[in-house]
């Protein structure tokens, strides 16, 4: 039995659900919005995890679960947790699930502890360097003078957030430089702009799915919003690069990740980050790569 946890209509969850249906694999959905109707009872007895989940009238022993896919939104913004009593119930439900995910002996995509490196991009960059991938020259600061010196040294510079909160990558142009003093309020990550081709690599329990992105924008994820283009096609990585991606993900303790690479015009390969909760549906939809199916089979232990 496979457990999916999140919002059933969210595209990645929908795709995994469809893949499980297509493969005829048994699963249950723990819908975050139905926490009040989905009791969770987990404990450790003689060193073994025991307990049960109740959903849609079914009682599922935790020991019967083969794998867990979790992609949960922040429960604090759910309308179902608006009043204080519901919020406390919701918090306890999520705490119980989070504890189970961390100690469950089954395959989990992904445990919170393994995902934690994404909360600090500078820290994650050090782990990326250890596997032999490059990272662009980077400055994290709230000092305008240091930013001016960094831009003077590198010419073209981009900026983005330091944490795991999604931000739109932008070029640091002259208009923004005129407002640079505002950076004093919050440290920002600045990087030397590197020309080349983006490749998103999804790693699913050691299996690699690279996607090449041809775009005319700095951040291809928002190219359409900016009037640009982003063309996605399957891509074949060199064996040594694919191996580095697998090693990186495995070293972080992740079962599923999206790695952002850039094949630079100078021949080097740069890595920007490792996303531990990737919205792979966008890439599967455009490239046709069977990422959801790989997740389904890995969770079932049939691959």
Image (cartoon, helix red, strand yellow):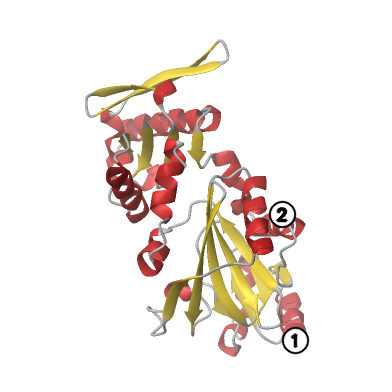
Kindly tell me whether residue 7 is visible in this rendering.
Answer: no
Q: Position of residue 276 (x, y in %)?
A: 53, 51
Counting residues from the N terminus, which is met first, the one under dot 2 or under dot 1? 2
The residue carrying mark 2 is: 127
Q: Position of residue 107 (x, y in %)?
A: 50, 35
Camera-side residue: 141 or 164? 164
Q: Residue 65's quadrant in the figure?
A: top left
* Residue lying furthest left: 57
Q: Which residue does the image show at 43% across and 78% down from the upper left?
A: 231
Check disc 2 and report its element: helix, strand or loop. Answer: helix
In the picture, measured across the screen, residue 35 lies left or right of residue 173, that is left
Camera-side residue: 291 or 77? 291
Circle 1 Cα neighbour tier, 10 Å, few/some/many (<14 / 14–19 / ≥20) = few
The residue carrying mark 1 is: 152
Q: Position of residue 211 (x, y in %)?
A: 49, 68
3D distance between C-alphas at marks 2 and 1? 28 Å
- Position of 218 relative to 50 (above/below): below
């Amino acid at each position: 039995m496979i457990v999916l946890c999140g919002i059933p209509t969210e595209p990645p969850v929908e795709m995994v659900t469809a893949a499980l249906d297509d493969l005829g694999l048994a699963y249950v959905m723990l819908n975050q919005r139905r926490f009040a109707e989905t009791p969770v009872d987990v404990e450790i007895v003689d060193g073994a995890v025991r307990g049960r989940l109740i959903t849609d009238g079914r009682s599922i022993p935790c020991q019967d679960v083969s794998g867990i896919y979790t992609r949960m939104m922040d429960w604090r913004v759910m309308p179902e947790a608006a009043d204080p009593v519901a919020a406390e119930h919701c918090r306890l439900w999520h705490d119980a699930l989070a504890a189970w995910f961390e100690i469950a002996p089954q395959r989990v995509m992904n445990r919170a502890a393994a995902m934690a490196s994404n909360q600090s991009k500078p820290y994650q960059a050090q782990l990326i360097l250890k596997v032999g991938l490059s990272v662009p020259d980077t400055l994290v600061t709230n000092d305008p003078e240091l930013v001016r010196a960094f831009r003077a040294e590198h010419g073209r510079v981009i900026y983005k957030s330091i944490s795991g909160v999604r931000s739109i990558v932008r070029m640091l142009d002259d208009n923004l430089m005129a407002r640079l003093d505002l950076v004093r309020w919050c440290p920002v990550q600045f990087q030397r702009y590197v020309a080349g081709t983006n490749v998103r690599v999804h790693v699913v329990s050691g299996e690699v799915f690279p996607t090449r992105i041809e775009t005319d924008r700095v951040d291809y994820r928002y190219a359409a919003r900016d009037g640009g283009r982003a063309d996605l096609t399957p891509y074949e990585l060199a064996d040594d690069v694919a191996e580095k991606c697998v090693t990186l993900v495995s070293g972080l303790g992740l079962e599923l990740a999206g790695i952002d690479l850039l094949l630079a015009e100078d021949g080097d390969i740069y890595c920007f980050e490792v996303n531990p909760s990737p919205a792979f549906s966008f890439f599967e939809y455009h490239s046709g790569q069977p990422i959801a199916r790989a997740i389904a089979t890995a969770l079932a232990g049939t691959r």
